Image (cartoon, helix red, strand yellow):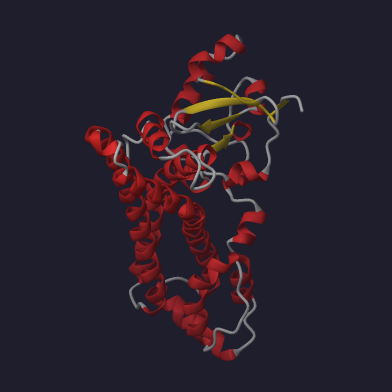
């Protein structure tokens, strides 16, 4: 199959390391048919085409004018700003693009695809269950996604629920009819945590395979004669462990707060909860983007535990895998 121009899809915006340039206000129409991606060294490059036989056609921003001579200086400036971002997940982009004063052409592009939202729906029960119990006295209602919850509170069918809603609104110092929007906003925030949680779980088996390989590297008699090499490999492993621990710690903290926040009588509690999540999105996105790319690259080069061997693993960790990890 010949190389084809990049076809932008919902999958692009669901990926943490891909930025479809169709959403970015650029002057050159040809750039809107490409995307910015993070490569194995965590460098941002432009992907011009991708094919089964030809692979991915990538160039750096500095090389762009060797391919497209008419690209403006303004476009180059925007691309250079985007290249410095650590993650391209939609939640990080909402904040980072605003900070960079880059207005997207289509704001719907800064939402996960409906397919991905449906995949994450199960996680939403962790968020909604305490509130449903608080208002309905039962958790048997089928709440799968934020829109289900919003619809439920737009049309309450029990007097007790109406009373509880009014009391809940008083606690928040808002009107009862403002609750659905508030819940939709918080549902979206919790969806972001669900997204990051799923990303970490998806690479968990590869992290385990990597750690098993590290055990073999450290116990290999031939490699034990080169302690500098082993130390360099161990530093990379420690970096990954630290990054993983930071993500797990933040997600666990949000889970603990979400279990108790509905019982809080402090209006500030909800605002603080939202600010904590928003403040963590770019941090979690950056770490998980790096971890995802590195683990996917490891899996590509060593698709099963027997592939490679301690000597090749150590060489790859030192010469390739540790590249780009400095910011983390």
Does residue 202 appear in this view? Answer: yes
In the rendered image, the residue lying farthest to the front is 221
Q: Position of residue 313 (x, y in %)?
A: 41, 37
Q: Is residue 10 above or below residue 222?
A: below
Q: Quadrant of the C terminus?
A: top left
Q: Position of residue 306 (x, y in %)?
A: 49, 45
Q: Position of residue 266 (x, y in %)?
A: 33, 74
Using residue 155 as the reference point, say whether residue 289 is left or right of it: left
Q: 273 or 322: nearer the eye?
A: 322
Q: 257 or 175: nearer the eye?
A: 257
Q: Position of residue 323 (x, y in %)?
A: 37, 31
Please tell me in which quadrant of the rendered image residue 277 appears: bottom left
Residue drawn at 60 percent across, 70 percent down: 150
Number of numbered labels in the structure image? 0
Q: Is residue 17 above or below residue 177?
A: above
Please tell me in which quadrant of the rendered image residue 268 appears: bottom left
Using residue 178 as the reference point, say whether residue 228 is left or right of it: left
Residue drawn at 28 percent across, 33 percent down: 229
Q: 10 or 188: nearer the eye?
A: 10
Q: Is residue 229 above or below residue 283?
A: above
């Amino acid at each position: 199959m010949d190389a084809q121009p990049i076809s932008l899809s919902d999958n692009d915006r669901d990926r943490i390391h891909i930025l479809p340039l169709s959403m970015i206000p650029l002057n050159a129409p040809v750039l809107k048919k490409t995307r910015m991606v993070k490569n194995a060294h965590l460098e941002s490059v432009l992907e011009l085409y991708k094919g089964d036989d030809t692979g991915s056609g990538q160039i750096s921003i500095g090389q762009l004018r060797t391919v497209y001579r008419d690209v403006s200086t303004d476009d180059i400036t925007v691309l250079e700003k985007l290249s410095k971002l650590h993650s391209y997940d939609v939640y990080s982009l909402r904040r980072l693009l605003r900070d960079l004063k880059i207005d997207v052409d289509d704001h719907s592009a800064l939402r996960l695809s409906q397919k991905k939202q449906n995949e994450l729906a199960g996680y939403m029960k962790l968020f909604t269950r305490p509130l449903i119990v608080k208002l309905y006295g039962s958790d048997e209602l089928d709440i799968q996604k934020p829109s289900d919850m919003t619809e439920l509170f737009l049309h309450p069918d029990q007097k007790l629920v109406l009373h509880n809603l009014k009391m809940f609104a008083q606690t928040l110092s808002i009107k009862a009819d403002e609750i659905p929007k508030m819940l939709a906003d918080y549902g979206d925030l919790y969806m972001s945590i669900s997204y990051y949680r799923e990303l970490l779980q998806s690479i968990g088996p590869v992290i385990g395979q990597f750690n098993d390989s590290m055990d073999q590297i450290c116990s290999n008699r031939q490699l034990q004669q080169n302690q500098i090499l082993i130390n360099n490999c161990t530093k990379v492993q420690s970096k990954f462990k630290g990054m993983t621990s930071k993500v797990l710690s933040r997600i666990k903290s949000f889970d603990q707060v979400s279990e108790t926040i509905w019982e809080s009588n402090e209006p500030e509690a909800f605002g603080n909860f939202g600010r904590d999540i928003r403040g963590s999105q770019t941090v979690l996105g950056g770490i998980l983007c790096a971890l995802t790319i590195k683990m996917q690259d490891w899996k590509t080069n060593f698709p099963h535990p027997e592939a490679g061997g301690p000597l090749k693993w150590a060489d790859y960790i030192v010469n390739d895998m540790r590249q780009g990890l400095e910011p983390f």
